[in-house]
Amino acid sequence: MKILAVADEESPALWDQYVPGRLADYDLILSCGDLKADYLSFLVTMARCPLLYVHGNHDQLYRTQPPEGCDCIDDRLVVYNGLRILGLGGCRKYHPGLFQYSEAQMRRRIARLRLAIWRCGGVDIVVTHAPPRGLGDREDPAHLGFESLRDLLDKQHPAYLLHGHVHLRYDTDRVRMLEYKGTTILNVSDRYTLELPDRDFPPRDRGRLLWKNRGPTREQRFEYYNM
């Protein structure tokens, strides 16, 4: 499975300088937030594969004008072609505004997802906007990570955590990839391509199926599980 992950900055190569067919090989697009809704709508149209997103702290306009053709997975667990994906957008609260959370609020959000995680037998990819504390964050109030996300990694050991929020081009000493107890943490600021072995099996037959769709152009399986 070939996944395009994006965050924070619209890539000219995928928008203003887009070449037809550049997104044809992707099976899934994941957005980690702080991108224009029109940009995400353009990507999902050109790629003709699902685009799942979480909110960044600058995505207030999504409330009234969400990206067309895309699906928000904030506070949801989605199974796509056997890949279990958990969405937890937003950042640490540093001033009044939407999609900002205290540490206690993020812990409660994660707690509400425990049943969904158990029903699916775990999680493979965690999609966030902010990074875990001490794993790719910064020390200024706006870019502190969440300790609760690090605790989630300690308990669930997903294969990947994808995040944005900390722009790589602003910090020359930032690294894109970190390893933490078996989890690869990727800062996907701008864009990053992730290629995974094909997995096409149903999740555990537990939980309540909320929505399912098979796409017309390729085998697609979207399954939302109740929290």
Image (cartoon, rainbow, N blue to C red):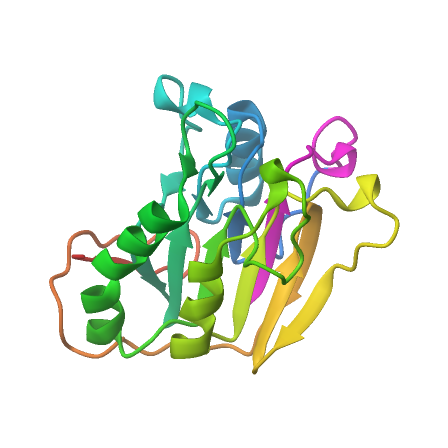
x and y, in percent, of residue 174 in the image: 80, 54
x and y, in percent, of residue 114 in the image: 24, 66
Q: Which residue is drawn at 29% across and 51% down?
A: 109
Give above or below for 129 relative to 94.
Answer: below
What residue span does the magenta drawing correspond to? 1-19
Foreground residue among 155 and 74: 155
Quadrant of the rendered structure where residue 25 is? bottom right
Examine the structure image and report whether residue 38 is included in the region drawn in magenta: no
> Could you tell whether 180 is left or right of 99 in the image?
right
Examine the structure image and report whether residue 5 is included in the region drawn in magenta: yes
Q: Can residue 216 be seen in this view?
A: no
Q: Is residue 198 visible?
A: yes
Foreground residue among 3 and 23: 3
Q: Residue lying farthest bottom?
A: 182
Quadrant of the rendered structure where residue 131 is? bottom right
Give above or below for 55 relative to 192.
Answer: above
Give above or below for 138 relative to 227.
Answer: above
For the C terminus, the image quarter is bottom left
Q: Residue at x 27, y 69 (%)?
A: 117
x and y, in percent, of residue 63 in the image: 36, 22
Q: How many labels does the image show?
A: 0
> Could you tell whether 126 is left or right of 16 in the image?
left
> Could you tell whether 32 is left or right of 139 in the image?
left
x and y, in percent, of residue 187 in the image: 66, 55
Foreground residue among 152 and 116: 152
For the N terminus, the image quarter is bottom right
